[in-house]
Image (cartoon, rainbow, N blue to C red):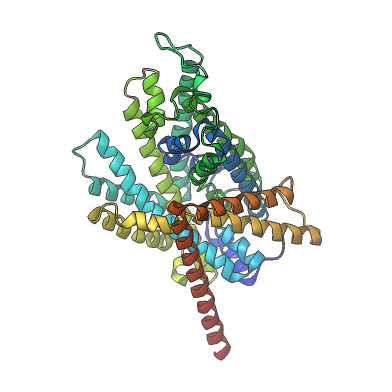
Amino acid sequence: MPQPTTSARTDSASDASQLGHALKPRQLIMMGLGSAIGAGLFLGSGVGVQAAGPAVLVSYLVAGALVIIVMNALGEMAAARPTSGAFSVYAADAMGATAGATVGWLWWAQLVIVIAAESVGAAGLLSTIWPGMSVPLASLTFMLVFTAINLMGVKNFGEFEFWFAILKVVAIVAFIVIGAALVFGLLPNVASPGLSNFTPEGGFAPKGWAGIGAALLVVVFAFGGTEIVAVAAAETADPSRSLARAIRTVAWRILVFYIGSLSVIIAVVPWTSEALRSPFAAVLEAARIPGAATAITLIAVIALLSALNANLYGASRMIYSLAQRGEAPRWLARVDRRQVPALAVMSCVLFGFVATVLELWYPDRVLPVLLNIVGSTCLLVWTISLLSQLILRRRADRAGTPLPFRMRGFPWLTVSALVILALIFGLLLSSAQTRMQFLSMAALTAAIAIASETARRIRNKKRATG
């Protein structure tokens, strides 16, 4: 890749001298896998099935292919230049400091809002199992616990995230095995539905391409968060090798778990069934597994807490990187003796605490509005990342710069992914339900870009006048 810009070079050097390299390759691999397996799969996959019928599998294949290309593009850049700013730094190198700062601040805003939503959501789910439990107390407890974990050092964070991911993976594998046994009539005293649910009431695609497109909007957001692997690579031993391994192993596993789970759900639960509100529980109940609803609820809680843990880490590293480049207050770039940007962690938590308290005071009023504003942010981050890779890879090839990890199929796969993203943005604009989300995100992006450019000009003017 090309030589970094001055601001990005400062970030990279500081990463090397201040942040540690305590994350292990196994932790990075499981983090990448776990970040894509969240409550959106366990609780939200039924929405996609209802939108497209069995043809939701096409939506998942398209979204899965998109995320694999994005991960490979990010992996190529991160292996060449591991830094906690990841795609924000690469955007700065490719398109200028304002582009880098904008995508960095936008991603940070999304994460700190989602942190609050995940804390409240996990507490709310637990209260369905234990009705006497205080949701506000549980939510704030989750925030305190995961703040402590992140302040204990990246090694401890990585170990917690590793075991969270293991639990989710084991749950999905068990679900697929039980579901396959049900479909093929291997469970005693349980009637097999066979494959008849793949083609009833309108066939495989009862709502046509419109349904597949509507489901794609639902499905694509389930993969949000995979980009955190590029951020974590900066604190991994031998990042180039570890990241390349993570990219290769995570991509196909995501497809196996998602496509495998959805195939079981479609085979067992008719796409018109109300039971799709909790699709995993519906399958386990059909298999006569006792306590299915409780088990799935607990797994969903684990998924939310895992995402909270990872998002707090990602947000703190992003704002640390922004501070290193002068795009955020410099004190946020300080690290403690554990090589943790503690002040950066606390700044992310502070926003999360405020949003959590407001949501608990005014239920279903605060967080839905905030989430609607940043709901499409992951799509913009992926778009900027692909554009950055397109620019930086061509620069590297022209200069003859060797790359530790080269994305195959360049530039055609990168361009294909950008076309898919353009179609998704078109779908967002064409739907009255999602148009405001897109426009709100666009307005926020423009505001951040203007503020960033204005602040930079003021700084440059002060330096010039001295």
Residue 410 horizontal/vertical position (percent): 74, 49
Residue lying at the far top in this picture: please name it: 189
| Residue 340 visible (yes or no) | no
Residue displayed at 44% across by 33% down: 167
Residue 320 horizontal/vertical position (percent): 49, 63
Residue 124 horizontal/vertical position (percent): 28, 43
Which quadrant of the rendered structure holds the C terminus?
bottom right
Residue lying at the far bottom in this picture: please name it: 465
Residue displayed at 41% across by 12% down: 190
In the rendered image, the vertical position of residue 294 relative to residue 443, given as above or below: above
Give 204 or 305, whichever is nearer the viewer: 204
In the rendered image, the vertical position of residue 396 relative to residue 73, given as above or below: below
Q: How many numbered tags mark residues here?
A: 0
Which quadrant of the rendered structure holds the N terminus?
bottom right
Give 462 or 202, whichever is nearer the viewer: 202
- Residue 3 sits in which quadrant? bottom right
Q: Report whether 302 appears left or right of 236.
A: left
Residue 350 horizontal/vertical position (percent): 34, 61
